[in-house]
Image: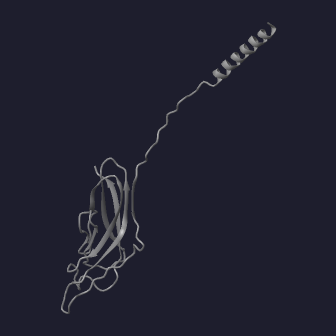
Amino acid sequence: MKSLRKLSFAVAALALLGGVVLAQSEDNEDTTTFDVTAEDVNELTIDAADNDFDLSLDITAAGDDTYTDGDEATLPDSLLLSHNFDGAVTVDAEVTADPGIESNDITLDVRVADVGEGWVTILDDGSPTAAQDIWTGIASDGYTQDLGFRVDDGAASLSGTPRGTYEFTVTLTSSEDP
């Protein structure tokens, strides 16, 4: 009987210990909530190996009174745009001339190849236009496009644009459509 009592006591002790162990191993959980904020993204970069380039004007034949041989440059994969707005954005271009630039009658055009508005004049007869839309309705995403510039042949005259170097700066701006 004594050994049966010892055995009963041992079994009871094990059962009690097992209950404590089981009680300690129950799951205990809690939750937390947090926000992830996607910041406004509207990044526009002209990324060309050489975004300082030269365009030239020339004539094609003696007796010409206008520059009939204009020039064009395309900067491949140079316009980088990323935005995450709900609506579309528009890219516009505006030109400024070096303050010391001589009077001229040059016409300068710009375009975003294959997706934009085609050739858009930003310098007309030597005078900068207001900012001009060159690519519109751009949905949120990331883009890499060719950017082109040209001086219009036949637009500048020999008498209105004397020989020399004329420096222009083109500023591109991306804006959320209203």
The residue positioned 20% from the left and 91% from the top of the image is 61
Of 97 and 23, the residue lying toward us:
23
Of 85 and 101, the residue lying toward us:
85
Q: Residue 162 occupies which quadrant of the picture?
A: bottom left
Residue 93, above or below 97: above
The residue positioned 81% from the left and 8% from the top of the image is 2
Of 4 and 59, the residue lying toward us:
4
Residue 164 image offset from top left, x and y in percent: 33, 84
Please name the colour scheme applied to the rendered image.
Answer: one colour
Residue 148, above or below 33: below
Residue 31, above or below 123: above
Extreme residue in the bottom direction: 62
The residue positioned 25% from the left and 81% from the top of the image is 70
Residue 31 image offset from top left, x and y in percent: 53, 30
Residue 138 image offset from top left, x and y in percent: 29, 55
Residue 91 image offset from top left, x and y in percent: 31, 60
Q: Residue 67 occupies which quadrant of the picture?
A: bottom left
Of 133 and 11, the residue lying toward us:
11
